[in-house]
Amino acid sequence: MSRRPQPATSQLRIIGGEWRSRRFGFTEEPGLRPTPDRVRETLFNWLSGELEGARCLDPFAGSGALMLEALSRGAAYALGCDTSRGVVQTLRGHLATLGCDHADVRQQDALGLLASAPDQPFDVVFLDPPFRQGLLEPACAALEANHWLTRHAWIYTESESAPAALAHPGTWQLYREKRAGQVWYSLWRRQG
């Protein structure tokens, strides 16, 4: 009887806030591309002072690194979603371990989630979809079209191409951008 190979596991570390230095494992899956520590550190420096009491949305949650980091730094609520049952169960387990009851993780396709309007809009959104699947631009459009954003929301994007090449809503203004290897990461501010 042949044994199936076990999926590889990796670790993420929360780099700031209440849960600083806590480490969590996650199963590597196709398309899962956790935001590296140094990129997360830069992003959360950019967002300094904006997370306390914020509602955060992570529709391509994956490892949960961005959502967990935001919660650790004072976000009032976070909603994450992923299509993988295993990813969702893992993230729910991390939240339970942390005793965090102000977050929700749904097993759902991101574009499916964004196709309807939320109960309340979000202050900060993290968009880091799997690359080369054409998901980023439709997600950006759906956030605007279906009222997911507060008037002056912050939107973080990770992409394989420069932000100037991204078809983004006209109400978004590029605040900061950087490149790390093959990844462009950018922070946008909605001008409501």
Image (tube, rainbow, N blue to C red):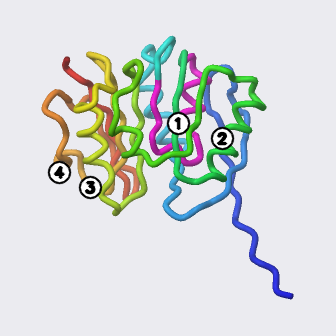
Percent x, y of residue 100: 69, 23
Mark 1 vs mark 3: give the one in front. Answer: 1
Kind of residue at badge 1: Gly
Q: Residues within 10 Å of mark 2 (few under 14, many from 20)?
A: many
Task: State which region is magenta.
Answer: 56-74
Tell me how far mark 3 sits from mark 2, CA to CA.
29 Å
Q: Looking at the rendered structure, which numbered label has been put on residue 91? A: 2
SS class, disc 2:
helix
Percent x, y of residue 137: 25, 47
Percent x, y of residue 139: 31, 43
Give whichever of discs 1 and 3 has the lower sequence position.
1
Cβ–Cβ under 8 Å for marks 3 and 4: yes
Percent x, y of residue 98: 74, 27
* Residue carrying label 1: 80
Q: Splitting the image into 4 quarters, where does residue 65 fall?
A: top right
* Residue carrying label 4: 165
SS class, disc 3:
loop
Tell me how far mark 1 sits from mark 2, CA to CA.
9 Å
